[in-house]
Image (spheres, rainbow, N blue to C red):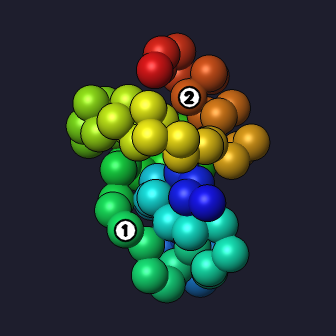
Amino acid sequence: MLKIRLSRAGKRNMPFFRVVVTEHTRAASHGYKEVLGFYNPFTKEFKIKDLDKVKKYLSHGVQFTPRVKKLFEANKISV
């Protein structure tokens, strides 16, 4: 099953997260299908590049992880 989840990037003590679509059994940092956006926890910046792609994935049965769902709700991004 595919999930929309966060993949950690950045250097030590300066995390930066990508919002990616990946298989739920794989590590999020290896083998993701597509990068949909990013989240910076220091500036609280959350940006999705293409909301239509997110809607397309959701219509095909892809699910959010709980953390990503909270980020969408907190930033008032409706899909």
Residue drawn at (49%, 84%), measured in percent from left and top? Answer: 30
70 to the left or right of 21? right
Amino acid bearing label 1? Lys
Circle 1 residues within 10 Å: few <14, some 14–19, many ≥20: few
Q: Nearer the viewer, residue 7 or 34?
A: 34
Please tell me in which quadrant of the rendered image residue 70 appears. Answer: top right
Amino acid bearing label 2? Phe
Q: Which residue matches tag 1?
A: 33
Q: Which residue matches tag 2?
A: 72
Marks 2 and 1 in Cβ contact (< 8 Å): no
Q: Secondary structure at mark 2?
A: helix
Residue drawn at (34%, 36%), measured in percent from left and top? Answer: 56
Pointer 2 or 1: first along the chain: 1
Q: Secondary structure at mark 1?
A: loop
Is residue 37 visible in the rendered image? The answer is yes
Q: Nearer the viewer, residue 54 or 1?
A: 1
Please tell me in which quadrant of the rendered image residue 73 appears. Answer: top right
Asked if residue 28 is positioned above or below residue 68 in the image, the reply reads below
Q: Nearer the viewer, residue 58 or 35?
A: 58
Is residue 17 visible in the rendered image? The answer is no
| Quadrant of the snapshot with the N terminus | bottom right
Q: CA distance from mark 2 to mark 1?
A: 20 Å
Give residue 65's position: percent from left, percent from top. Answer: 68, 47
Give residue 61's position: percent from left, percent from top. Answer: 53, 41
Q: Which mark is residue 77?
A: none
Please state the total of marks drawn on the protein image.
2
Give residue 46's position: percent from left, percent from top. Answer: 45, 38
